[in-house]
Every structure is written in C-alpha cells, then in structure tokens.
Image (spheres, rainbow, N blue to C red):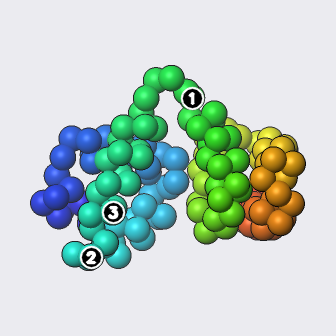
C-alpha cells in the first residue's frame, strides 16, 4: 500500500525497489498491505533507512550484507527475521552451503542454542526454496 502520503518519498521508493529485489514481491506486499496508522511509521523507517539508505550503499555487495544479517540475526536469536533473510540471502546468491557455514561460525561466537534455532529455520526455508 504505497499510496499512503507518508510513503511518497524518493528514499522510500529507492528502498522499496531493493526490498522487493531481496525479499520478493509477495513478502513485501504482505508487509505493506497490512500497514495501518499504528504500523505505518515503522514500515516507512525500515523501508527508507534499512533498505533505501543502508542496502543501497556501495561499500558492500548484497551477498555480503546477507552474510552479516544472518550472523547478526543468529546472535540476536530472531527466527522470524532469519526466515525472511535466508530467503533474501538465497536471492542474493548465497548458497545453502554458505548459509550453513555462517550458522556454524555464529554457533561458536553466539551460542549453540541460537544456532540450533537458526539452523532449524534456515533448513525449512532452503527446503521450500529447492
């Protein structure tokens, strides 16, 4: 629902393009179609600053950003976000073997329980993707 007046910015449109390329139209459409007056400010912030500003910076390739996100989300033990970003990582050219390696690396530095949750979710997404 990008017709909301607060979403009519150049940075939002720039972020929306990248968000769709990484996460897919279906996920982004579900997120935006469920926006209401309460959740709109956060959707605007995420789309503009996360996707419009940070993901568009030239310093890192999308694949590298996906590696970082998977490691950080494992550290934070955020399985819902892991699910979304495993799909994004696959879209960005990260292989299933590389996803496993990121999770193994994170297990050592972030803890085995977080890595087990992450691996469970990642395996589910990879199987769906294949």
Q: 34 and 102: which one is in front?
A: 102
**Marking on residue 38:** 2
Give coordinates of residue 73: x percent, y percent.
Answer: 64, 55
Count neighbours of disc 1 (C-alpha within 10 A) and say few if under 14, some if 14 to 19, many if 20 or more: few
Count neighbours of disc 2 (C-alpha within 10 A) and say few if under 14, some if 14 to 19, many if 20 or more: few
Q: Is residue 6 left or right of residue 71?
A: left
**Marking on residue 87:** none
Q: 5 and 42: which one is in front?
A: 42
Q: Element type at marker 1?
A: loop
Sequence-wise first label, 1 or 2: 2
Label 3 belongs to which residue? Answer: 42
Q: Quadrant of residue 119?
A: bottom right
Give coordinates of residue 54: x percent, y percent.
Answer: 43, 37
Give coordinates of residue 71: x percent, y percent.
Answer: 70, 47
In the rendered view, would you say 115 is above or below 10? below
Cα distance, mark 2 to mark 3? 8 Å
* Residue 43 visible in the displayed image: yes
């Amino acid at each position: 629902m990008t017709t909301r007046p607060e979403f009519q910015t150049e940075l939002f449109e720039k972020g929306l393009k990248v968000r769709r390329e990484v996460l897919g139209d279906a996920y982004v459409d579900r997120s935006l179609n469920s926006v209401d007056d309460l959740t709109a400010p956060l959707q605007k912030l995420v789309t503009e600053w996360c996707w419009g500003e940070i993901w568009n910076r030239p310093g890192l390739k999308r694949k590298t950003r996906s590696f970082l996100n998977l490691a950080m989300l494992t550290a934070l033990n955020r399985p819902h976000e892991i699910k979304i970003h495993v799909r994004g990582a696959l879209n960005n050219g990260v292989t299933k073997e590389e996803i496993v390696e990121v999770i193994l690396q994170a297990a050592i530095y972030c803890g085995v329980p977080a890595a087990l949750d992450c691996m469970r979710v990642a395996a589910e997404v990879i199987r769906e993707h294949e």
